Amino acid sequence: MVNTKSNPHTHNHQADIVVIGGGTGGYAAALAAAKSGKKVIMTEETDWIGGQLTSQAVPPDEHPWIEQFGCTRSYRQFREGVRDYYRRHFPLTSEARSRPHLNPGNGGVSRLCHEPRAALAVLHDMLAPYVNSGRLQILTRHRLESVSVDGDDVHSVTVRNLTSGESVTLHGTYFLDATECGDVLPLAGAEYVTGAESKSQTGEPNAVDGDALPQDMQGFTYCFAMDYIEGEDHTIARPERYDFWKTYKADFWPDRLLSWSGVRPSTLEHVSYELFEGTDKYSLFFYRRIIDSRNFQEGFYPGDITLVNWPQNDYWLGSVIDVSAEEREQHLWDAKQLSLSLLYWLQTEAPRPDGGQGYPGLRLRPDIVGTDDGLAMYPYIRESRRIKAEFTVLEQHVSTACRPDGKAEQFHDSVGIGCYRIDLHPSTGNRHYIDVSSLPFQIPLGSLIPIRMNNLLPACKNLGVTHITNGCYRLHPVEWNIGEAAGFLASHCIDRGIMPREVRNEASELRTFQTMLESYGIELAWPTIRPV
């Protein structure tokens, strides 16, 4: 048994279900567990719950049918809540207000591009009944410190208050790892995988040849918000690492990273970008625009606002998982330097269509992301540690090229659905994009069950997928569904007095659980639709 160190300043709390990590999946897990009547504690390292939707500043990446089907009822409630938030509180134009599928930013990436603070407000509103009743306790600014394990069971976890420095030990019946990097897994001694598996391990067409590469993971990104005020100068101080990033060029990239050059991920052919719309090149400002000022009364917003999560600020020089604390901090700092260097390059040196250089009117917006430095509270982590699960989803289960019948593998133990291309960004192993077509897929219950641990469940991107299939299981509505299913699973197991693997492996128990999920608005299967 691994015990936490005795600490006179350690406080103890008890819950039925403890959720470590308040990101998109952790949030959905806590919501589900509280809905089903359990006492829940959810911790979060940053000031904001919501993860990708808030503290990481990533507008939702979703599939083409999201307005009709293909997500859980609670995720749809969140989406409609964001639209209603703008209708209730903002001076929209009459045309925008009447639009059923209001998109505040009209960005190219999503049918719902919005400010992180709008998402945060809606998320808190959805949790309010459970927080106010005392059923759910949220501990923001609490970082995981240690895990106490007794055999195959987690006994407690200890988190540290980043403001006071005091430790809090959390006891529960079930523990859900919803940290962005799967941080509970190594501390609990749970079996897990990182990085890229080999073809000999998985047989996946896009797995690596030769040995597996545990430190080869998708790059991560420090996103930031900016607007543009014509005629003003908002140039930031020259970043410390600007000289490095200004000249940096990866061997596999067509030009310097800080340039208008990129590639089409699915074909790797060279493409050229532009900042604003109006030319024949794709506008990166439009790409993840979260406020289109034309949706609001004239003058309310001085300019459009965009979130910068572009090819130019993907960081792939090293991993932040299973490295020393010093190396992790170095990569996080350097990734911030990359994002700030991109902004400085845009303000001072970026070629303009009129032949000039730089857009000094670009203004960093710290208020949008809630930080002093203007960068998101937490990096956008695309790839986590992943549990060794009772069942692992492979490329062969979901890739269009691997499925001649045009349907993804049908999982008898489905606990939800998702849809996105298999989309892997350049990696820390200096490998290029992997972007291939996939079929609308299911989330098998087996991928949520560790091979050994009894009361520890994954609740975000740390489920039983591979480096390849993580590329389509990592997006907002899928992560939400994963977390929601994990929250309901833990609650169901407490009610029935059984283990998660018993739910999966006993037909009557599985059907009872799936019926319960459907009653809460979780779709378990897709209608017949096309690949993406």
Image (tube, rainbow, N blue to C red):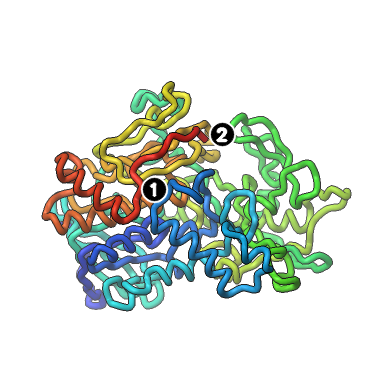
The reply to whether residue 212 is in sight is: no
Q: Nearer the viewer, mark 2 or mark 1?
A: 1
Seen as rendered, the residue at the extreme left is: 497
Q: Which residue is mark 1?
A: 461
Front-most of 69 and 32? Answer: 69
x and y, in percent, of residue 432 in the image:
56, 34
Q: Is residue 289 left or right of residue 11?
A: right
The reply to whether residue 135 is in sight is: yes
x and y, in percent, of residue 223 in the image:
58, 57
Front-most of 385 and 3? Answer: 385
Front-most of 407 and 502? Answer: 407
Q: Is residue 394 above or below residue 339?
A: above
Q: Is residue 14 left or right of residue 463?
A: left
Seen as rendered, the residue at the extreme right is: 355
- Report the label total: 2
Q: Which residue appears at 81% of the width and 68% of the height?
A: 232
Q: Which residue appears at 36% of the width and 68% of the height?
A: 142
**What residue type is disc 2 on?**
His
Front-most of 284 and 1? Answer: 284
Q: Which mark is residue 432?
A: 2
Q: Residues within 10 Å of mark 1 (few under 14, many from 20)?
A: many
